[in-house]
Amino acid sequence: MKRNTRNAVKAKQEIIEKSAPVFNVYGYAGTKMQMLVDATGYQMGGIYRHFETKMDLAREVFRYNFEILIKSNLDLAPELSPKEKLLQIMANYEAMIRNPKVIGGCPILNTSTEVDDTDEALSILTKSFIQEVIGEIERILRQGQAQNLLQPHFDPKQEALYLFASFEGAIVLAKSLRKLSPVRVVFGKIREYLEDKVFLT
């Protein structure tokens, strides 16, 4: 029994990982079950054995894509200063754009534009992940504020929204134009902004 359970868990994870680029490239409506069969090597019945519907699998894939593409960018060494943490997040985002672990672009952008009015559960999940990232950026900025490292009259909540929107906007441009120059320009401007307008040192 234990062996069967282990195998089931392994099979489920394998389906998620192999389905991840398919959903991220073709979207949830555009992804057909035969595409998932081809990508995973599992027959349709094998996939449905682990996921009741395609959207059940889609939600698990979205969680997986978010974890390895976006949340991993927030995995920072605790000894870094607040400014160093923000700069490291930017460096992580740039590395993700240049050499993504899953092709297809940012899962937050892809999912939020597709399912906002079509799948309530996935839309709620997307919004919660957006809030999680913005919240982490805000937490870093508040840490800098508590250490008197930020300019006076600074609002961490508003600036966290601005920084997140700038990150995601750069990704949209890079994907749409099929070149990395927008990322270099936007992220360069953000670095200047952090140096000149946000942090005191």
Image: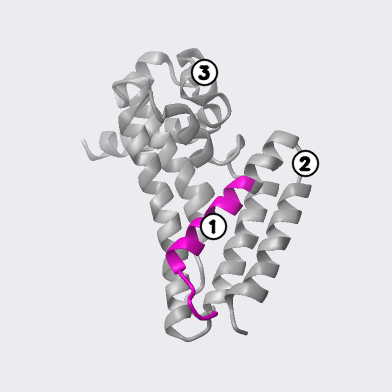
- Which class describes the residues within 10 Å of circle 3: few (<14), some (14-19), or many (20+)? few
Name the side, left or right, on which 176 lies relative to 147.
right
Does the magenta stretch mainly form a helix, a strand or a loop?
A: helix
Is residue 61 part of the magenta span, yes or no? no
| Image quarter in which the C terminus is found | bottom right
Name the side, left or right, on which 183 lies relative to 151.
right
Q: How many marks?
A: 3
Measured as percent of width and height from the top left, residue 73 is found at: 54, 57
Q: Which residues are magenta?
A: 151-169
| Image quarter in which the N terminus is found | top left
Q: Residue at x 51, y 73 (%)?
A: 77
Ranked by sequence position, the earlier of labels 2 and 3 is: 3
At mark 1, the secondary structure is: helix
The quarter holding residue 196 reads bottom right
Labelled disc at residue 162: 1
The answer to whether 166 is drawn above or below residue 13 in the figure is below
Q: Residue at x 61, y 59 (%)?
A: 92
Labelled disc at residue 179: 2
